[in-house]
Amino acid sequence: MNWDDTDEIGIALYQAYPEIDPLSVRFTDLLRMILSMPDFEGKEEESNEGQLEGIQMAWLEEFRDHQ
């Protein structure tokens, strides 16, 4: 996975952290969570706020679908 795989990252985050409300996660923590994923190949310096927001929204959609 890389930064452009927004939906895939969102699903993986939900699977790893199903009990966490994505809106409660700060972008600094979200960045750390993404970078620690075993299948993630992107680099920290390649990220930006827009990508993190998109990933957070994809995770939120997955979270809400399972509530």
Image (cartoon, rainbow, N blue to C red):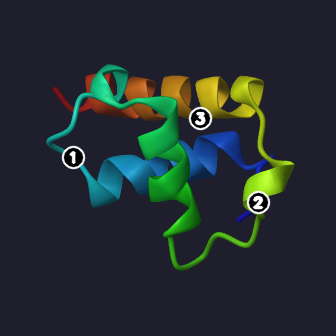
How many labels were placed on the picture? 3
Horizontally, is 20 left or right of 10 in the view?
A: left
Q: Quadrant of the C terminus?
A: top left
Q: Nearer the viewer, residue 42 or 1?
A: 42
The percent coordinates of residue 49 (x first, y second) are 71, 26
Q: Is residue 28 above or below residue 36?
A: above
Distance (Cα) linking label 1 and label 3: 15 Å
| Location of mark 3 (residue) | 55
For the point 55% across and 48% down, which residue is it?
31
For the point 32% across and 56% down, which residue is it?
15
Query: Which sits earlier in the primary sequence, circle 3 or circle 2?
Result: 2
Q: Hey, which residue is sitting farthest bottom in the picture?
A: 38
Res. 21 image quadrant: top left
Is the Cβ of the residue at disc 3 closer than 8 Å to that at disc 2?
no
Q: Is the residue marked by circle 2 packed among few (<14), some (14-19), or many (20+) residues within 10 Å?
A: some
Query: Which sits earlier in the primary sequence, circle 1 or circle 3?
Result: 1
Residue 2 is marked as: 2
Distance (Cα) linking label 3 and label 2: 11 Å
Horizontally, is 60 left or right of 38 in the view?
A: left
Q: Is the residue marked by circle 3 packed among few (<14), some (14-19), or many (20+) residues within 10 Å?
A: many
The percent coordinates of residue 4 (x first, y second) are 81, 46
Q: Is residue 14 above or below residue 26?
A: below
Residue 18 is marked as: 1
